[in-house]
Amino acid sequence: MGEGVDPTQMCQTLVDKVAQSKLLMAITDSEVLVLFEDWLEELEEEIISIARRHGLLNAEDLAEKLRVSKRGAIFLLSKLKRENKL
């Protein structure tokens, strides 16, 4: 992605904080959390759809297709595998 803030790193940080929901609710506006969760769910659904149509892509190809960093694609793939969604 471009220079500056890495949105994938921001997302990974937020996902880690979701696990600590009391802390997250204390420091994050609930509307922002809802937007993040919606966006993350959309990405996950898109990955599952891609995997059904084309088979599981490697992280580099998935990153290009979703327009996220390779690190973000690795994170999303790992999360979906951990949750037995892939």
Image (cartoon, rainbow, N blue to C red):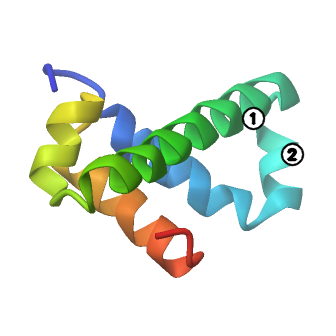
The span from disc 1 to disc 2 (Cα, nearest Å) is: 9 Å
The residue to which callout 2 is attached is 25
Q: Is disc 2 placed on a helix, strand or loop?
A: helix
In this rendering, the answer to whether 62 lies above or below 58 is above
Q: Earlier in the sequence, mark 1 or mark 2?
A: 2
Q: Is disc 1 placed on a helix, strand or loop?
A: helix
Q: Nearer the viewer, mark 1 or mark 2?
A: 1
Are the two marked residues, 1 and 2, in contact with CB atoms closer than 8 angstroms? yes
> Can you tell which quarter of the image residue 22 is in?
bottom right
Please rate how many residues cluster around mark 1, counting C-alpha atoms within 10 Å: few if below 14, some from 14 to 19, many from 20: some
Residue 10, horizontal then vertical, whole percent: 44, 40
Residue 39, horizontal then vertical, whole percent: 59, 31
Residue 8: image tag: none
Please rate how many residues cluster around mark 2, counting C-alpha atoms within 10 Å: few if below 14, some from 14 to 19, many from 20: few
Amino acid marked by disc 2: Met
In this rendering, the answer to whether 72 lies above or below 84 is above
Q: Is residue 10 left or right of residue 63?
A: right
Q: Residue at x 82, y 23 (%)?
A: 31
In this rendering, the answer to whether 45 lies above or below 74 is above
Residue 20, horizontal then vertical, whole percent: 76, 66
Task: Farthest residue to the front: give it.
Answer: 53
The residue to which callout 1 is attached is 33
